[in-house]
Image (cartoon, rainbow, N blue to C red):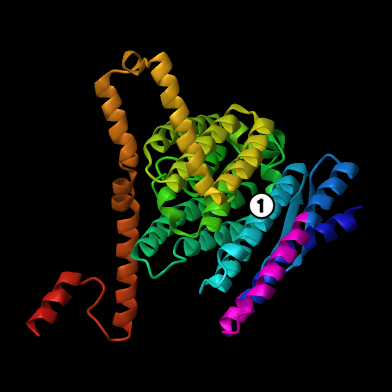
């Protein structure tokens, strides 16, 4: 049954990847497909992908209970073994991949009508298929190269969809925030991959996901495992908006509603959680990193729970509500409740998808809940003053309404250095062409010379 399984996985991953190539090439030559073709191809491609991965899950469950590494040839021969596309398939990876394809199919069907006659219609579906391809790579990655490619595709498509309405200054500014945080996440992921390759002598993720005993056989000590796990937690924190990187999440809602649903309500925000769940054997080999993950998850859940209660718009409220559940999922992984964590990921992703796609109805439901709660408080009274002192309540409200002051922290520690570096590199490129002053000379000096002229 290994041959049918390999073909099913290839069809499941290759279907959205092929559509991404077709739509992307059509856009590059400025010959985008008509809307009716794009919508039909996107729906059919994702339906085929979801069906193939679901059948692959059934076939795998009927034939074996362990993991299986599927290799689709070597694509480079610069080193021994070459660069291969490898997928590590087991029940968890196939289930998450099938869920990702199904959710993306629902979003594609919704987007076909939601973005009808939108100038960026074709661009949206190019980015959506890029995202789905990246998510399937992350879910099924069998080596570091495949994982990193998928990780980058998810991050790049996320940032570009935040800036989908690029004529709005706020959308572009918020996309820069997302991209800045993702660069930290990607750097941590790359560092963990390089260190794993150096310590273990292999880039196969089958080793990392196969258990503590297998990790010990390749000389992975507790110290090296802790360093790799901490780098992995930093990568997960950036991608899943854990503290202290939570400030970018509500600003990412500048994109279209369908992209908010699939990215920050359903799949993208859970990609880091899924990777952490897959790396559970590494956390078991590094108790300090496991404690760190639990603390970050608990702090994020508390922060999201406070902040979601003071938001004035429904999308931000849903974003922080999602963040609360993501924090709880990370705590479950740190505790060792892996089955509960996976079910939580699947259920929460489906639930948030429904909420984001029906945001106006959610707002109506929230008003009904608030009315019911106010009626209940009028009948039975409230004990809030007795539970919490007024000064502490005001302090917590200030922290929540200012979103933990994380915007200022991210601006000063991440976005501003990232922007200054980009400006210096731009000036270096212009200086090499003889257009402006050297990049090491302050920008103020150039401005004063312009005023003198």
| Left/right of residue 430 with respect to residue 246 in the rendered view | left
Q: Which residue is mark 1?
A: 103
Residue drawn at the location 68% of the way across and 57% of the way down: 105
Residue 202 rendering spot, x and y as whole percentages? 67, 52
Q: Is residue 302 above or below residue 389?
A: below
Q: Is residue 347 above or below residue 97?
A: above
Q: Secondary structure at mark 1?
A: helix
Q: Are there few (<14), some (14-19), or many (20+) residues within 10 Å of tag 1?
A: many
Please identify the residue farthest to the left as the structure is shown. Answer: 452
Residue 87 rendering spot, x and y as whole percentages? 74, 55
Based on the picture, tell me whether residue 38 belongs to the magenta stretch.
yes
Residue drawn at the location 17% of the way across and 76% of the way down: 446
131 or 293, nearer to the observer: 131
Residue 274 rendering spot, x and y as whole percentages? 62, 43
Residue drawn at the location 43% of the way across and 58% of the way down: 254
Labels in figure, total: 1
Quarter residue 388 falls in: top left
| Left/right of residue 438 with respect to residue 305 in the rendered view | left
Residue 343 rendering spot, x and y as whole percentages? 67, 36
Based on the picture, tell me whether residue 450 belongs to the magenta stretch.
no
Residue drawn at the location 70% of the way across and 53% of the way down: 102
Q: Is residue 291 above or below residue 230?
A: above
Q: Which residues are magenta?
A: 24-50
Quarter residue 163 falls in: bottom left
Q: For the stretch drawn in magenta, what is the main secondary structure?
A: helix
Visible residue check, residue 127 = yes
Image quadrant holding the C terminus, namely bottom left
């Amino acid at each position: 049954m290994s041959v049918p399984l390999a073909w099913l996985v290839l069809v499941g991953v290759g279907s959205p990847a092929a559509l991404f190539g077709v739509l992307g090439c059509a856009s590059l030559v400025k010959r985008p497909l008509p809307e009716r073709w794009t919508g039909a191809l996107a729906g059919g491609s994702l339906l085929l992908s979801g069906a193939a991965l679901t059948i692959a899950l059934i076939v795998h469950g009927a034939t074996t209970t362990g993991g299986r590494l599927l290799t689709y040839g070597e694509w480079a021969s610069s080193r021994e073994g070459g660069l291969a596309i490898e997928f590590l398939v087991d029940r968890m990876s196939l289930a998450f991949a099938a869920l990702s394809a199904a959710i993306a199919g629902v979003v594609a069907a919704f987007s076909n009508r939601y973005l009808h006659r939108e100038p960026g219609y074709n661009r949206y579906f190019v980015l959506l298929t890029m995202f789905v391809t990246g998510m399937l790579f992350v879910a099924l990655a069998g080596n570091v190269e495949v994982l990193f490619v998928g990780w980058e595709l998810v991050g790049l498509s996320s940032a570009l969809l935040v800036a989908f309405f690029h004529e709005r200054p706020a959308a572009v500014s918020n996309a820069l925030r997302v991209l800045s945080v993702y660069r930290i996440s990607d750097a941590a992921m790359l560092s963990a991959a390089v260190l794993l390759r150096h310590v273990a002598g292999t880039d196969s993720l089958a080793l990392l996901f196969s258990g503590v005993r297998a990790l010990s056989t390749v000389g992975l000590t507790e110290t090296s495992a802790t360093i790799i796990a901490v780098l992995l937690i930093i990568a997960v924190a950036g991608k899943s908006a854990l503290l202290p990187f939570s400030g970018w999440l509500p600003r990412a809602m500048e994109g279209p509603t369908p992209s908010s649903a699939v990215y920050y309500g359903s799949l993208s925000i859970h990609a880091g959680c899924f990777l952490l769940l897959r790396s559970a054997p590494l956390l078991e080999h590094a108790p300090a990193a496991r404690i760190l993950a639990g603390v970050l998850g608990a702090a994020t859940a508390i922060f999201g729970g406070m902040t979601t209660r003071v938001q004035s718009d429904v999308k931000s409220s849903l974003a922080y509500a999602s963040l609360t559940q993501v924090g709880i999922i990370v705590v479950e992984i740190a505790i060792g409740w892996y089955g509960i964590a996976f079910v939580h990921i699947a259920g929460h992703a489906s639930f948030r998808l429904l909420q984001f796609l029906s945001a106006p109805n959610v707002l109506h439901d929230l008003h009904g809940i608030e009315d019911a709660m106010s009626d209940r408080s009028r009948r039975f009274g409230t004990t809030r003053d007795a539970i919490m002192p007024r000064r502490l309540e005001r302090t917590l409200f200030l922290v929540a309404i200012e979103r933990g002051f994380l915007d200022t922290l991210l601006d000063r520690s991440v976005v501003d250095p990232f922007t200054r570096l980009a400006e210096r590199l731009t000036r270096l490129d212009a200086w090499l062409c003889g257009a402006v002053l050297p990049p090491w000379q302050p920008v103020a000096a150039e401005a004063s010379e312009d005023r003198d002229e």
